[in-house]
Amino acid sequence: MSQPLHTVLRSASKEVVIGSDKPFCVIGERINPTGRRIFQEQLRAGDLSAIERDVAAQVAGGANVLDVNMGVPLTDEAELLVKAIKLVQSLTDLPICIDSSVVEALEAGLAAYQGRALVNSITAEDERMEQILPLVKKYDAAVVALPNDHDEIPMEADKRIELTEKIVRVATQEYGIAIEDIVIDPLAMPIGADPTVGRTALETIQRIHERWGLNMTCGASNVSFGMPGRHALNATWLPMAMTVGMTSAIMDARTPQIVEAVRAADLMLGNDEWGMAWIANHRAKLAAEKAAQEAAAAGIA
């Protein structure tokens, strides 16, 4: 593609643009009850206070967008998702990625959201696209799409490209969705389970970028699942993916090692003009450290 595609997301008052010529978009993953037993129990009891803490931590960590998932068993997910979205929007002006496998919950969340959301997600399965793409169009959203179907998660790059082609064709031609509003997840798989999956994902990213120029995202922590030293692996994987076309990731914005790695890659790839963001972040970090030291010294005194 001669001109980079721009996926525009908005809250009520803030716009974030995802593109290969823009700084990497950090989508904070924390507002998700999966694997968080205490958080699930709190949500079932109607206690949303952990969301407030998660929002604050991710904003402080440098997130650009916040993923919101309320998939808690034995709850009304649609109702809970609407409450969470309204709460998040009262706390921050960052745009939201509405994350649910339940179609009714997605529609309720989109109806309640003030802005232009990112929907997470569809696959290349016909039924899934038929259910969700009309909502994406109706609410003028963007959508994350995974190139897998009802048969399998393909392990070969060729099959992922074939399914990406299907998604692009169906979304643009049958539902009238702009190509820039399709964000592909190239399927980053756990490197600990198969040492070839990293190369396959990188090949997939590069081929998608070269053929369509589509923006891409992934669940960054998938790569390191089951391995020790996960922060180091994620902080290595994301800059490598950025060099071949990855433009965003659903990731832990509370982890400085990973966020700093993608911001350094932004600088190296020319997406941080004159290093101004890097310099500003460095100065803010030094100021925070100095303030903490002074506070500690005052406490001792």
Image (cartoon, rainbow, N blue to C red):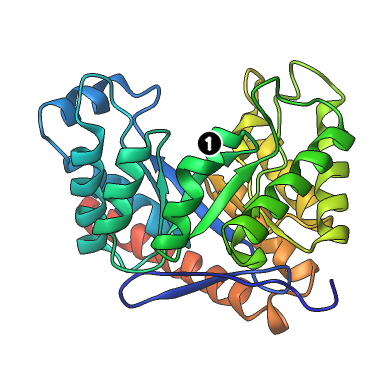
Residue located farthest toward the front when viewing the structure as drawn: 174
Residue 127 found in image quarter = top right
Is residue 254 visible to us here?
no
Residue 20, image x, y percentages: 73, 68
Residue at (21% x, 19% y) in the render: 74
Give SS at disc 1.
helix
Q: Residue 246 vs residue 254: left or right?
A: right
Residue 29, image x, y percentages: 46, 43
Name the foreground residue: 115 vs 64: 115
Count of picture labels: 1
Q: Residues within 10 Å of mark 1 (few under 14, many from 20)?
A: some
Q: Quadrant of the N terminus?
A: bottom right
Residue 15, image x, y percentages: 45, 75
Name the foreground residue: 12 vs 275: 12
Q: Residue 263 vs residue 130: left or right?
A: right
Q: Quadrant of the C terminus?
A: bottom left
Q: Residue 214 vs residue 283: left or right?
A: right
Is residue 133 visible to us here?
yes
Residue at (46% x, 49% y) in the render: 28
Residue located farthest toward the bottom when viewing the structure as drawn: 274
Name the foreground residue: 98 vs 250: 98
Residue at (28% x, 26% y) in the render: 72
Residue 97, image x, y percentages: 43, 53
Q: Is residue 84 above or below residue 215?
A: above
- Dot 1 corresponds to which residue? 128
Identify residue type, mark 1: Arg
Residue at (71% x, 47% y) in the render: 238
